[in-house]
Image (spheres, rainbow, N blue to C red):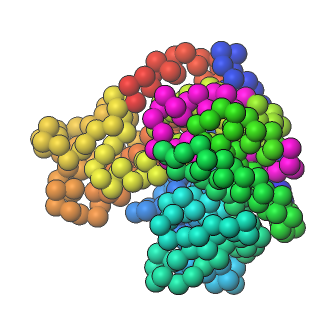
């Protein structure tokens, strides 16, 4: 079934929204954070780990899954959720991010994008129609429209061209959708207020099932990212879910929620975990640091979670120094537990009207 957004409450202090996103694979409480499972796995974790942490929606990537194992294989085996043993909902990025990240090995035209596979150099053509077709074959709950994400920094002319192609492709994404397929449109425009205004009007005029702000987490400093979010978020349709793509620093999430955004994804908690970094209420720490060598206690007493509570900071440091796979796994469990708690406390603060206290609690995170 198409996704459906239910608005439950609005924070009296800010524009924060408390809602529910109803999908074919369950209800997602919002605001929510989506762990990134690019190729059908949240790195180092099993599906049941992610579920046990309380997550009900994850993100995967169309480009990567189309290359390997191929969408037809996934479809034949029952869809991406069944394939990876995941019981919750799934959102897929369209391949638009790779238009930016693989710019050195792709060609753009009005018809779409032609990639050179990062695996073997073979040619892969991705049009809006093809992207939507792949996502339908994967059997996901939310398909993202194929767009063009401009890099940062880029010239105004590059931002204009990326926006032009995004707008040109937007209705083609919708025209290609299958029965009951939900598609989110993406607002682009770089850091230029007038382009963002133009893009917001163009994208929200189309009957997408949800709306995303893209292109604000590709290298922009915070002082350039946040004004774009603050200006655009409140103007997205009230009755549809609002998704801020690629933003994951706790402070940026809090700012975006207070601006009216509902959904987030980012590789930060999982990627930084593999580089021995833990998220704490005192900020991000390097658990491999010398100071933790003999610490027979958690690194952050304020962030102790069931999945990792039996392991001391000294032991986690040892695992990383010994290059044991358990180190990244425990760090990933910790970080995703931290993010799950952050989102739960955000939802509670909106419901109870305690937003100022929440901001104080996470002031250093």
Decide whether residue 209 is among the magenta residues: yes
Q: Position of residue 31 (x, y in %)?
A: 64, 37
Relative to 105, is 214 above or below?
above
> Residue at (35%, 58%) from the top-left corner?
329
Q: Is residue 143 visible?
A: yes
Decide whether residue 168 is among the magenta residues: no
Does residue 245 appear to the left or right of 338 in the view shown? right
Q: Residue furthest front?
A: 157
> Residue at (36%, 49%) from the top-left corner?
272
> Residue at (86%, 44%) from the top-left corner?
205
Q: Position of residue 163 (x, y in %)?
A: 69, 49
The C terminus lies in quadrant: top left
Does residue 163 appear to the left or right of 97 in the view shown? right
Relative to 214, is 137 above or below?
below
Observer-nearest of 115 and 241: 115
User: Magenta part of the protein: which range?
Assistant: 205-234
Observer-nearest of 73 and 188: 188
> Residue at (46%, 18%) from the top-left corner?
360
Observer-nearest of 213 and 165: 165
**Residue 259's image quarter?**
top right
**Residue 76's image quarter?**
bottom right
Q: Is residue 83 visible?
A: no
Q: Position of residue 4 (x, y in %)?
A: 82, 47
Q: Position of residue 281 (x, y in %)?
A: 38, 29
The N terminus lies in quadrant: bottom right
Q: How many marks?
A: 0
């Amino acid at each position: 079934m198409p996704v459906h957004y239910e608005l439950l409450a609005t924070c009296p202090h800010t524009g924060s929204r408390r809602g529910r996103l109803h999908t074919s694979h369950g209800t997602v409480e919002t605001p929510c954070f989506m762990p990134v499972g690019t190729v059908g796995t949240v790195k180092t974790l099993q599906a049941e780990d992610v579920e046990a942490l309380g997550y009900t929606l994850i993100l995967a990537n169309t480009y990567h899954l189309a290359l390997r194992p191929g969408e037809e294989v996934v479809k034949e085996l029952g869809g991406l959720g069944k394939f990876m043993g995941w019981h919750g909902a799934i959102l897929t990025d369209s391949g638009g991010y790779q238009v930016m990240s693989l710019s050195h090995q792709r060609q753009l035209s009005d018809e779409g994008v032609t990639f050179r596979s990062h695996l073997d150099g073979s040619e892969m053509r991705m049009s809006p129609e093809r992207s939507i077709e792949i996502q339908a074959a994967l059997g996901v709950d939310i398909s993202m429209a194929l767009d063009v994400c401009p890099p940062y920094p880029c010239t105004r002319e590059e931002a204009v061209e990326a926006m032009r192609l995004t707008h040109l492709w937007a209705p083609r994404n919708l025209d290609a959708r299958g029965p009951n397929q939900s598609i989110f449109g993406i607002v682009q425009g770089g850091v230029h207020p007038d382009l963002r205004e133009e893009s917001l009007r163009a994208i929200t005029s189309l009957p997408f099932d949800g709306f995303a702000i893209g292109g604000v987490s590709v290298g922009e400093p915070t002082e350039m990212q946040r004004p774009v979010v603050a200006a655009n978020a409140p103007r997205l349709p009230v009755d549809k879910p609002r998704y801020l793509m690629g933003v994951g620093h706790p402070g940026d999430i809090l700012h975006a929620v207070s601006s009216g955004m509902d959904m987030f994804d980012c590789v930060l908690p999982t990627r930084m975990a593999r580089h021995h970094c833990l998220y704490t209420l005192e900020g991000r720490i390097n658990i491999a640091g010398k100071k933790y060598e003999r610490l027979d206690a958690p690194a952050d007493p304020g962030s102790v979670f069931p999945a990792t509570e039996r392991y001391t900071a000294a032991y986690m440091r040892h695992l990383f120094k010994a290059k044991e796979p358990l180190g990244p796994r425990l760090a990933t469990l910790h970080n995703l537990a931290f993010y799950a708690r952050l989102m739960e406390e955000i939802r509670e603060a909106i419901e109870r009207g305690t937003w100022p206290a929440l901001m104080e609690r996470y002031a250093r995170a």
